[in-house]
Image (tube, rainbow, N blue to C red):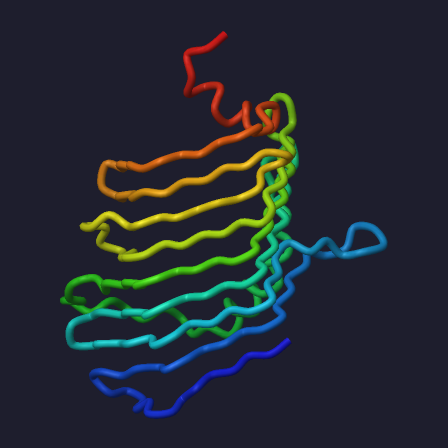
């Protein structure tokens, strides 16, 4: 595993500052073992974050690009609704809570909320494996070769983001090109679907469709 940060030109506590680059390679997160082996819930080959700019006076944080290569997510939920990643994250969250000081009292005038914007997000060769025991019947879904490109995202959601997605779903294929807005929400674009595994996705869409 490797974490690399480029601090060149960074001036701590300045009103405006830029972190040129952050890299995290070979991350793996596993849940506590219940059998012989621990269950991996999250992994990626390479994460790169470029040009993180902070403007304290304007209360803005802007990221030029986020690139994630070969991420793998193992999502499992038991019949009681407990996710596997909850067990994986619990020890880390406990450490953070123990090391964190008591929360400070908020200032009388905290000012406007911070605005976070990311110009571009790229995901390459992603994989998601879902096993969900809360649905009837239980759902199992494999997503591979996931390619995703999102441009123009921000927390205020005033402008739609551009989305370009393609993935192998089971033995089929799913793609989308268009825009999405958090206000509404509104999604517009072109969907390409071929040989999708209907039994796997049916528990999530059956209530939304007037079909028998």
Image check: 209 left or right of 128?
left
Percent coordinates x, y for residue 181 in the rendering? 26, 43
Q: Which residue is rendered at x = 58% and y = 73% of the image?
A: 25
**Does 126 sit above or below residue 119?**
above
Q: Which residue is rendered at x = 50% and y = 76% of the image?
A: 23
Between 110 and 20, the one lying in front of the other is: 20
Percent coordinates x, y for residue 40 in the rendering? 69, 56
Q: Quadrant of residue 92?
A: bottom right
Percent coordinates x, y for residue 129 in the rendering? 63, 44
Q: Quadrant of residue 121?
A: bottom left
Q: Quadrant of residue 49?
A: bottom left
Q: Which residue is rendered at x = 54% and y = 23% of the image?
A: 202
Q: Quadrant of the N terminus?
A: bottom right
Percent coordinates x, y for residue 117 in the rendering? 28, 63
Image check: 145 left or right of 116?
right
Seen as rendered, the residue at the extreme right is 36
Between 200 and 131, the one lying in front of the other is: 200
**Does 164 sit above or below residue 63?**
above
């Amino acid at each position: 595993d490797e974490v690399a940060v480029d601090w060149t030109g960074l001036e701590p506590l300045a009103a405006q500052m830029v972190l040129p680059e952050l890299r995290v390679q070979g991350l793996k997160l596993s849940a506590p073992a219940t059998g012989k082996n621990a269950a991996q819930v999250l992994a990626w080959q390479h994460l790169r974050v470029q040009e993180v700019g902070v403007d304290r006076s304007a209360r803005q944080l802007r990221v030029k690009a986020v690139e994630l290569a070969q991420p793998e997510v193992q999502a499992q939920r038991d019949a009681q609704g407990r996710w596997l990643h909850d067990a994986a994250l619990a020890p880390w969250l406990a450490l953070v809570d123990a090391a964190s000081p008591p929360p400070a009292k908020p200032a009388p005038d905290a000012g406007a909320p911070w605005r976070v914007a990311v110009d571009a997000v790229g995901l390459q060769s992603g994989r998601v494996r879902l096993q969900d025991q809360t649905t009837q019947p239980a759902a199992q879904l494999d997503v591979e070769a996931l390619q995703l490109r999102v441009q123009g995202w921000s927390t205020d959601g005033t402008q739609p983001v551009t989305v370009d997605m393609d993935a192998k779903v089971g033995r089929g294929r799913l793609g989308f090109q268009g825009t999405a807005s958090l206000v509404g929400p509104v999604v517009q674009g072109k969907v390409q679907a071929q040989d999708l595994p209907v039994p796997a996705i049916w528990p999530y869409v059956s209530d939304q469709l007037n079909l028998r």
